[in-house]
Image (cartoon, helix red, strand yellow):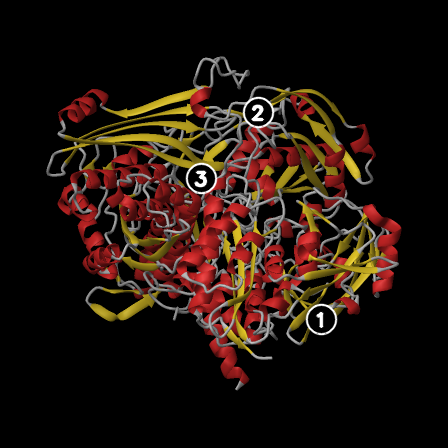
Amino acid sequence: MALEATEKSPLGKAIKRKEDPRLIRGQGRYLDDIVLPRMLYMALVRSPYAHARIKSIRLDEARRVPGVKAIITGEDLAAANLAWMPTLAGDKQMVLAAGKVLFQYQEVAAVVAETRAAAEDGAQCVEVDYEPLQVVVDPFFALSSEAPVLREDREQKDNHIWHWAVGDQGAADEALAKSPVRVKEKIRMPRVHPAPIEPCGCVADYQKSTGKLTWYVTSQAPHAHRTVLSLVSGLPEHLIHVISPDVGGGFGNKVPVYPGYVCAVVLSLQLGRPVKWVESRSENIATTNFARDYHMTAEIGATEEGIVTALKVSTVADHGAFDAAADPTRFPAGLFSIVTGSYRFPQAFAEVDGVYTNKAPGGVAYRCSFRVTEASFLIERTMQSLALKLGLDPVELRRRNFIRPEEFPYNSPLGWTYDSGQYEKTLQKAMSLIDYDGLRAEQAQRRERGELVGIGVSTFTEIVGAGPSNTFDILGIKMFDSCEIRIHPTGKAIARLGTRHQGQGHETTFAQLIAHELGLSAADILVEEGDTDTAPYGLGTYASRSTPTAGGAAALAARRIRQKAQKIAAHLLEISPDDTEWDGIHFHAKGLESRQVSMVDVALAAYTNLPEGMEPGLEATFYYDPPNLTFPNGAYIAVVSIDRGTGQVKVERFVAVDDCGTVINPMVVEGQVHGGLTEGFGIAFMQEIAFDEDGNCLAPNFMEYLVPTAVETPNWETGRTETPSPHHPIGAKGVGESPNVGSPAAFVNAVVDALSPHGVTNVEIPMFPWKIWEILSQHHLAR
Amino acid sequence: MFPEAFAYYAAHTLDEALDYVDQYGYDAKILAGGQSLLPLMKLRLAAPAVLIDINAVAELTGVTETDGQLHLGALTRHSTMEFGCWPQHPLVAEAAQQIADPIVRNRGTVAGSLAHADPAADWGAVLLALNARVEVRDKHQSRAMPMREFFIDTFTTALQPTEIITRVEIPAPPAFGYVGGHYYKLERKVGDFAVVGVAVTATLDQGGRVLSAGIGLSAVGTTSLKATGAEEILVGQRLTPELISEAAQVAASESSPFGDRRGSEEYKRAMVQVFVERGLLAIAEGGSRVTVHSA
Amino acid sequence: MEKVESRAEVPVTLTINGETRTALAESRTLLAYFIRENLELTGTHVGCDTTSCGACTVLVDGVPVKSCTMLAVQADGHVVETVEGLDKDGVLHPLQQAFWDNHGLQCGFCTPGMLMTSLALLRKNPNVTEDVVRHAISGNLCRCTGYVNIVKSVIEAGQKMALEEV
């Protein structure tokens, strides 16, 4: 049973969440719950074509629809110099189609009306004449000389966006050439979508009298959104107030700025009335940022004993019509260079080419630190192939190649310094939890009976907490984060952070962390995020960065308060600050524990009874620039069986042992793991946005974009090892995304393990029954 | 997402409903459960000018059983069939609990699903297997037809625009035997339409000989299908592995699936075979779902 | 409600969480929006447009219904229950308490629908197994929790409700 928030010394304890009482009563305040006086509703006109020139747009009929107040098109925006907006990846994106459309469902016009229904009626009556153009769906074709140039706005006249490479190519090639054992796999991670249950939306409220824009928006990064909006609109930044209310899930989907947001702002500026835009689920999946869509090839070299010698990776990244990823500036392929994983590769080289196609723009980090899921999936899948080739148990192969505990900090050949880990111990724990040896014996017996049973292992290392200012920025803004704490006279406090939670439980976990530092309880601390007029600047919540960055800021802000508090305590105890000691709950005289004062006593004194000359008050702000990233890791083991008649895969068991460093709230950590595993399961088995050859999106809603229900979802078994990060103020690493990063490979490795005695080495995700059945059929296993 | 504007007329009697359909014909749609119609209207893929709500028509509600025969009022919800207790029709509840999701089943109706005539829907196959009859009427007269005459094409039925389905009748299984029935639905997740659905039912005499057999197929043709060839093979025979295998092959050959993102034509045909085989094997082996039927 | 012409607004009266309320609606107004916008009970959420997600689940005459797939005019004269009606005089319903105790929610957006579906389930029979709960909530999508703690919460709430009945 979880503990109450009044618990003392709360760090590491399962404290019940402080956000829950309002959410379980239906009193959360989400974006669409916001209704302002004289508010108008906006709907978007979208292109039915994936690539077409716009010949004309006729608005007469739409304007006649009862309730319609205004309509804007790309031409109107161009006149205001707002036709394009910057993406968080340094590209630019059309707000409303400027002359042509580049993907199906692209935004063409925005209609504002008195009601939701009237806005939709109006949008339906906008008539657009299109001249269809040749559609480019395949990124490899996009790179060929026969492909039409999609982005005519660029100086570069092809569909290649960027080339990014890391590592020593010559050395990697040479090491591979010398390796007696080599495996090569082509691995694809299809286009998927985060699809939080709350879609994206905003209410733009511009007051002409004050010149102030209040912008309510489903945002994981409200400060970044404020700055981007200021840059796009030219509005002074201090007159933009961004409020991100309760957010109904994000998973990366609510990091970017979307055309609908900009249109709502423009229309509010134009009309002087609040404008609400909330996308439908179809609009969410078909147009707001997708993730993955990586076409990867990996080659591993190894000795005959199974010691890895080199890794070489090349990848084509399909970004759709605009590179609208939210990657740090220097990392167009994110942190994909974590691709050497948990293993001691002496040499490695990775390169990625970004490509434009006629698909919706992206791709965000969907429940993963920038492109880390892709990297993890690739290395964990290819290690499976190596184990098969060598005839080694996948566990044994991993053991032979793990970075050892004494080797940390470990410098990877692709440039990262891993902070800490006990990979062998973590794996061992997962193996004991699932009885790995017993399972292998059982598998052998079941195989005798003709059953197809597989055991899949994934021992991944993540890289999160972007990031240190010397390396990481988005649009030039360094990726620090922040916390401001104010202790009130009665010993209660408010803490504000630059992050914005979407279900991760910050109102509880950050309260626990701060309370622990200050000798208070979580109940004493109100945590507030998402209001840019009150919270200090920060880059937001995504890529598992909140605890590594803002969490560090919170701990250090609290310690800053403690420093001052120690002086006040000394004053109260009538001793010197040097003779004052902090025991976690109280300040007391060194060697005399009975003479003590609490933080509550100190708080009151900070406003009523200060040492001579001290500035009143008890508060601190800390902008934390992390010295390094953190490297959460885990060992996952999946057991599957395959129905030989239908190709259906049943996940019989799944054990996840995570090491995310110091744990603030084990209940919340476990919840994060459950959720991430479920999304990883969805990605492995059913989630995919496919397109036909005309660029039509084949999964634009929850009927075709399949997310798991409680029935398909396995019952997750979890465990933990705890290896603190040596550089983080409390040793925490971040956990929200590890399970989504590590699990897809475990599922696929299990299916491959089931089929490998019959020569199968790869299965493409999502592993729909028909795909498995075709493999069964080819290998004469179907019955 | 809002539907386009429409007029809403609620009928309280069957006569009133029939007057409305008579008056508005093609411009109108019947609103029963609305679980297919309203989503289509929200997506603006359907925009009827008039909705005729029949939910308050008492004559169309209720399920009655007479001598083993089931009479389903047109407003019978999927959940009613899921939780009802009709031991002589084991197929019905097993199929009902696989339709859409539990909340949709509380609103969606058997007759509405039939009228919508999506070949991937479940009731078509089940009711074809059970040799059900559909009773429809317009303002002037009532007529009834076997299920297999009801489906004309995808989303097209024998129902005229001035007609309403009033009742579905599921005949009693033959007396003095064991009845078994199973519905296999291959879906990618709960809430999905069938990739392939197969309804199998059979009544066996004391000696294990097949007195009657029914096989219905979902999502493997332009309409729900009845595998009559396979049914004929079974009648009068014992359910030996060889016979079961033969019937399954024949049923597969009677299907005419299209390849799509849910599977190739070959795959879907193979699934028909797999499920017919599994269904017949389960019936042959008895087990908990097989109930004794006494006259 | 007898006849509502296209685009006309008519008064719709229903009993919601024990209170009789009337507001104007068009024929095309969906019950979910009527509850959220006309009756200003925003605990009922809308998460999709294909009747898939179940975030909008309310009870109509005690039966869970996706309120985005029912017209407001169809609810005229009926009894509707939403998440706002669960706690009584500030005391949490056992389901709410169990969701809180067991970390059965994260972002909270699907939670009202989950609670209402589970309420109808446990009223029928509070003694439920994991399998029963998983099937019962399979019309309600959650992207945060992986369902494990939701299932646990519902089972625990059922045990408490069974004791209260006795």
Q: Are marks 3 and 2 in contact (CB under 8 Å)?
A: no
Report the number of numbered marks.
3
Q: Residue furthest front?
A: B236
Q: Residue at x 47, y 77 (%)?
A: C159
Tell me which chain the residue with mark 3 is part of. Answer: A
Q: Secondary structure at mark 3?
A: loop
x and y percentages locating residue A516 in the rendered image: 34, 60
Q: Residue furthest bottom?
A: C166
Closest to the observer: A668 or A471? Answer: A668
Q: Is residue A687 left or right of residue A469?
A: right
Q: Residues within 10 Å of mark 2 (few under 14, many from 20)?
A: many
Quadrant of the snapshot with the C terminus of chain B: bottom right
Residue A374 image-quadrant placement:
top left
What whole-number distance in Å separates the C-alpha atoms at marks 3 and 2? 30 Å
Q: Residues within 10 Å of mark 1 (few under 14, many from 20)?
A: some
Q: Is residue A404 left or right of residue B68?
A: left
Tell me which chain the residue with mark 2 is part of. Answer: A
x and y percentages locating residue A637 in the rendered image: 28, 53
Which disc, if any, is residue B62?
1
Q: Which residue is mark 3?
A: A539
Q: Residues within 10 Å of mark 3 (few under 14, many from 20)?
A: many
